[in-house]
Every structure is written in C-alpha cells, then in structure tokens.
Image (cartoon, helix red, strand yellow):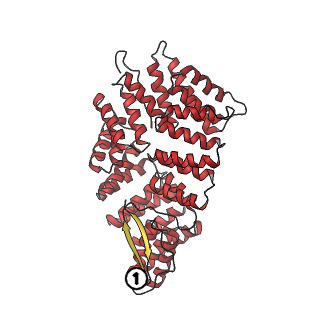
Amino acid sequence: MIFHFSKPPSSQLENQPIADKDNSQTTVILRGNIPQISNNGTYEKTGDDFLNKDDLENAIANYQKALEKNPDSQDLILKLATTYLKNNQSDEARNLLTESLKTKPDSIDLNIALARTYLGMREIEKAKGIIWTLDEKNNFVQYYKGIILVLYKDFEGAKKTFQNIADLNPKPEQSLLDNNQKFLDAYQNFSYYKGGENLYLEILLAKSMTGAEEYQAAIPLLYDILNTKNNYRDAWVLLGYSYLNVNKPNEAIDALIQAKDLTPKKPETLFYLGLAYFSKNDLDKAIYYIEEADKNGYEPKDQIKLKLGDLYLLKQDYQKSATNYENVLSKNTKNMDVFIRAVWLNIDKLNNPEKALALSQKAADKHPNEAMSFNLMGWSYTALGNYDKAKEDLEIALRLQPNLDAAQLNYGWLYEKSGNKNLAKEYYKKAYILGHGNSVGVLAANRYNNLSTNISAPNIEPIPRN
C-alpha cells in the first residue's frame, strides 16, 4: 500500500467443508464457520498455509492443535500469539504468553511478544516495563525500545536508538534492518521541512509503524495526533488501515468515514472502506466503495479487479467475477490462484470451456514448471471432451507433483465423463485422502458418493469437528 502524505494545515489538522464417515458410505456436510483442521499430523504447516492466506481462524485452530501435541514449542507459542493479535484477540495472546513465561521467564522473544500485546491493548506503561528490563544488547529489544520512545514522544531518544541499530557491526538480520530503516527514513523526510511541526514527524513515524506492520503501536500514536488535530485526514486513513490489519472492521469504518468526509474522492480512503465492508460481509457497500476507488484512480488496478472478482463471486454474479479475474490476468500473471478461479468459473458456472482452455494455456506459458498449469489444461480439455489430450496434461501434472489433489480429482472426472466409473472412484478416493478436508476433498467425496451409493466408503478417518 502506498500513502502520499501531506503536511497538516498550520491551523488545523465461504462455508467451510467437513467430511464425515459413517458405517456405510462417505457423506459430506457443509457447515459454516467450522475450522478446517489438518488430519495428517502437520498442524503447524497447515496453520502456516492458512496464515499466508490471511485465514486467521483456521490458522489459529491448527496452531492450537499443534501446540497440544508440542506444548513446549516456543515457535508455536509465538506463532499462535502473533495470530491472536492479528485477529483482534489480545486477551488470548496475553494469557498464552503470560502462562508460557511462567516456565520460560528468561525468553526474550516471549517477553517482547507480551510487550507487543500490551501495545495492542494500549497499555504502553506495561509494555515499557517489560522492554526496559530485557538485555539491551538484543537488537529487537533496542528496536522496540525505539518504538516505545516514539509513543512517549521522546523523538530524539528514539532516533538515536534506531541509528544505533543501523550502525551495528555485524549487522542485524535483514528484516529488522529494513523495518528500522523505515523509521530513519521518517526522520530524514522530516528534516527536509525546516521548522516543521512535530505533528508532521509523528504522522511520518506512524506511517513507518504501519509499514513495519507494527499496527498495535501505530494506533495509540495516531490517537495522540488526532487529539491535537482532529481533521488530519492522513491520520484518519492510517488509523483505519491499522484497524483493518488487526481485524477491527467497525473501528476501521469509523476512522475511514472521517477521512472520506474530509476528502470525499481520495482513492485510498475509498479502497480501504471497501475492504472494511468486505470484512463485515457487507458485499454491496464493499463493491460500491471499491468501484468508486477505481473511478477515482486507485492503483494498482489489478488489486482493484482482484477484490471485485472475489466480491462478485460471493454475490454469485459469475460473469462479472470472471471478467474481473481475467482483467487481473491481463496485467499480472503471477498469481496462480487467479488462474484457478477464472478457469473454474468458465467451466463450472459459465459453460465456456474454450475460454477456460485459453486461460489454462496462458497459465502454462507463464508457469511452465508448475503442476497446476497442466492440471488446469487437463481440466479444460476434459470439459471440452478431448479426453486423450486431457490425460496427457494430467499425467504431466502428476509427474511434477504426484500428491496434487486437484489433478487426482480431475483424473476422476475424466474417467467419470468417459464412462469408466471404477477408475473414477479410485481417483476420487485419492483426491479425498490428499485433500484433508479441503474443498477438493469435499468435492471428491461428493462425486464418489454419487457413483457408489451402495459401496462402502474408503477407509479414511473423519475430519475432527473441533
């Protein structure tokens, strides 16, 4: 996200699938808001995958399961606590860390995580009380000391702290250096304005906090700014953006409406308002604001089109959804998930397998070494009834990635459509097993059931309910 900051005026400022097994056959039950839990023992990896997709609820559910199996893992404790914070669950993060520190009181990482949690709860004094007791030679301790000094408005002390980190030899890890540099850049930018108000330095530092993903620390700083200059638009935008990133959509909307009232056509404000309504599942308002952001010149365009594709998909306006996804792919072909959605819509919802094949071929051209590209082509050729070509591409997909559940599913569909039900069932069983309760596994179970109502289910343990 790119912000263009101005100085303040001088006088003002999807249903989740769960597969069950009974004694006679596999049945699939669709339920809302039920966590998808890995059933192959890789809870941590599954949690990481969900976290990378910003699916915080499922990430938390899997990390909790992983922690049950390995309760002494500090890495898991930190992952779960961090995800709690992102999901607006500060109390859970604090309780987890406080309990963990009873057995690991000297852990600097756990203490820093607890301090960050207190920042998120706007208990800055408690955060300071932790950081100031930790080893000053630790680079991360110094970094959070600098952030807390900013919140106490000791700007010179914070600047010296950030500069000391930059001057260290040997150098700290690159991620810390990069985030630290964001604060030094704020001081550098402020120095260009001789006699500039400290309020402008504060907004630059707040921007640095959001750039470094320290949203919990940015929020109290932004409130201080707005208490001084209540009509400082950039502060309202940053506050709304920060609330979005700690899963507080109502607070985000309140802040962004304030920003919109000050500058009604600012595209960043409109885009973030759309995202905030999206997170509340208010699809009509989300579409309205994101389309308004587009009209007013929001960049990058592919970000706009991707969100509109998702929104129209949820509204079951499949043609508009596909059009937006295809618009994304005309500008940015890096995201394979967009290819998958566009191909699926054209095959399953729009009865346009020719377009699906064209998109699949584009995916293969841009991602020639990925199994999913060939899976998409096999899927498209099957929809077109060209089973020989479909089989060629699906074989390549499985050579590249033998455990690709989607390719196993599409092989089953190929054999079902060509009349070989026994082979179709075998591939559906493989897809179900490999899917571990995801959407591919659920579809495989449904198709297996449709082919074998009176046949015993594959010997697979059910997905846990909780």
- Disc 1 marks a residue whose amino acid type is Leu
Task: Point out the image quarter for the N terminus.
Answer: top left
- Figure quadrant of residue 419: bottom left
Q: Nearer the viewer, residue 5 or 51?
A: 51
Q: Nearer the viewer, residue 415 or 183?
A: 183
Residue found farthest to the top: 195
In the rendered image, residue 398, in percent from the top left (x then y), is placed at 56, 69
- Figure quadrant of residue 302: top left
Q: Residues within 10 Å of mark 1 (few under 14, many from 20)?
A: some
Q: Is residue 266 above or below residue 278?
A: above
Q: Is residue 405 above or below residue 197?
A: below
Residue found farthest to the bottom: 454
In-image side of 324 versus 431 (left or right):
left
In the rendered image, residue 344, in percent from the top left (x then y), is placed at 39, 63
* Residue 28 visible in the shown view: yes
In the rendered image, residue 83, in percent from the top left (x then y), is placed at 50, 49
In the rendered image, residue 105, in percent from the top left (x then y), is placed at 64, 44
Residue found farthest to the right: 170
Determine the residue positioned at 42% across, 82% down. Answer: 25
Name the residue beneath numbered marker 1. Answer: 451
Q: Nearer the viewer, residue 317 or 33?
A: 33
Q: Is residue 433 above or below residue 253?
A: below
Q: Nearer the viewer, residue 66 or 460?
A: 66
| Label 1 secondary element | helix
Determine the residue positioned at 62% across, 34% down. Answer: 141
Residue found farthest to the front: 102
In-image side of 354 versus 168 (left or right):
left
Total numbered labels: 1
* Residue 180 visible in the shown view: no
Determine the residue positioned at 43% across, 32% down. Answer: 3
